[in-house]
Image (tube, rainbow, N blue to C red):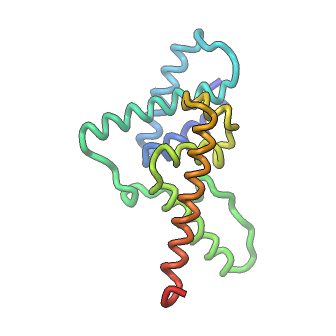
Amino acid sequence: MALRHLDAAYNLGRWLLGNEQDAADAVHDAYLRAARASDSYAGGNARAWWLAIVRNCCLARLAIRNKEKRNVAIDQHPLTAEHWMPHTDADDVEDRIDSAKRQRLITQHLQNLPDHFREVLILREIEELSYREIADLLQTPIGTVMSRLARGRALLQKALADNVTMQAPYGL
């Protein structure tokens, strides 16, 4: 069950933990937990069940990290947009450069969002889970998922718009 969704689990772990090694460790821990708890799986959406286990392992690692006061800086282990953004076959070099810049900006601003907004955006927009699946995974009401998603999108859009405004000459 878990192996079919291993890429999604690793991707979620990378976004929540901020680096590939911690994500790999968390997914490994989650796989062991899932294997031990497989007899208690009551059916339903296997992907949501598996990602909930991965999320819990990531949150446990974050709690330990925060307790030890050794947070990882984003620029220390950069997450590149190539991991989740679709590649374009643009013929024009300028279009490809602009696309790469936009992808870097989106990745940067997404990483800067508060965890509860970033996590819902990742699950919905990148992992393409339904609102119900996200609500089940996070063990929160579907209305909370919807409001976090809307607020996260708005914050991301504002950050991107502010970035464009800051780069315009003389604030124009």
Q: Residue furthest top?
A: 39
Q: Residue 120, percent across and down? A: 57, 43
Residue at left offset 54%, top offset 17% = 35
* Quadrant of the image occupied by residue 131: top right
Q: Is residue 109 above or below residue 96?
A: above
Q: Is residue 22 left or right of residue 80?
A: left
* Quadrant holding the N terminus: top right
Q: 160 or 101, which lies in front?
A: 160
Q: Is residue 111 left or right of residue 89?
A: left
Residue 165 makes an appearance in the image? yes
Q: Residue 92, percent across and down? A: 72, 80
Residue 7 makes an appearance in the image? no
Residue at left offset 65%, top offset 29% = 47
Q: Residue 34, percent across and down? A: 54, 20
Q: Residue 140, percent across and down? A: 56, 30
Residue at left offset 51%, top offset 31% = 54
* Quadrant of the image occupied by residue 62: top left
Q: 32 or 141, which lies in front?
A: 141
Q: 93 or 44, which lies in front?
A: 44
Q: Residue furthest left?
A: 68
Residue at left offset 59%, top offset 48% = 121
